[in-house]
Structures are given as structure tokens and as C-alpha cells.
Amino acid sequence: MLVIDDHASLREGITGVVNAQPDMIIAGEASNGQEAIQQYRALEPDVTLLDWNLPVLRGEEVIATLIAEFPRARFIVMSALSGDDSIQNALRLGAKAYLCKDMLRRELLPAIRAVHQGRQYLPDQIAASLKSMQ
């Protein structure tokens, strides 16, 4: 798994939680969109956890670039934003899951497992947000 976020403390927390699982490991980290693309190309992880609001290149640019090169890439987008069109944009670009950062404690591991199996994962709050936008 590759973790991409511009906050080192968040990356460290996620790494600790994921690496404590017997069936998961963090293969690499990146702090901006440009590093994310470089790390993805080098590691080709099974799942990538990607902050939507990154410096240098935004999350949407990272997903668009990498899915064009690696059509089977699996992304979980995380963001402080909910209820706006960023959810729709992320899913339209190919993300398999969208999590608000305040959901990570309870939703991260189920999301990783679902996306690793090729399934979409949307917590109830995100799914309700999508319905209200239609």
C-alpha cells in the first residue's frame, strides 16, 4: 500500500494502523502529488490511499495520470471535504473509495480490504451525500 498525504503525522498514524494488520503493509509514502506519481511508478502498490488536496499536483491530477498508465490502479481518496463535487470527481476519475479524514479510525481498514478485493467502498455518510447531490 502507498500512503500519500502532506501531513507526516497522518502518514505515520496510518502506517502504524496498517502495519499492525497481519494482511497489510505500507510499501511507501509520499507528501505531494509529484512524489506520489514517482512512488507509484516505482512500487506499483495494490492499493493507494491518496489525499485529495495535495501540494504540487492535486489528487485528481495524480489519479488521472496514474490510471492512464495503470488502468488497474486502486485508489482510496481521503479528504477533509464532504458533500461537494470532490466525491463525484474522485469516483468519476476511477477512485474506488472516498473517506473523510474524520472517518479514518473506523472506515480505513474496511475500505482497504474492500478496494483490495476490487470492490467500491462508500461509507453511509458519503453515499447519502452523493444521493443528496443528484
Image (tube, helix red, strand yellow):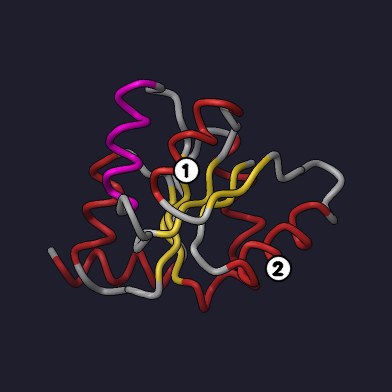
Residue at 49% over, 63% down: 6
Find the distance from the CA under tag 1 to the CA under tag 2.
18 Å
Q: Is residue 35 left or right of residue 112?
A: left
Residue 128 location (% of width, % of height): 31, 70
Of 28 and 107, nearer the camera is 28
Residue 63 counted in the magenta span: yes
- Quadrant in which the N terminus appears: top right
Please, what secondary structure does the residue beneath circle 2 have? helix
Of the residues shown, which amino acid type is indicated by label 2?
Answer: Gly
In the image, residue 71 sits, relative to residue 79, either above or below, namely above
Residue at 85% over, 56% down: 20
Q: Residue at the far bottom: name it.
A: 102
Residue 40 counted in the magenta span: no
Which residue, given by chain and number where applicable, does mark 2 sit on?
13
* Magenta highlight range: 59-69
Q: Is residue 113 left or right of residue 122?
A: right
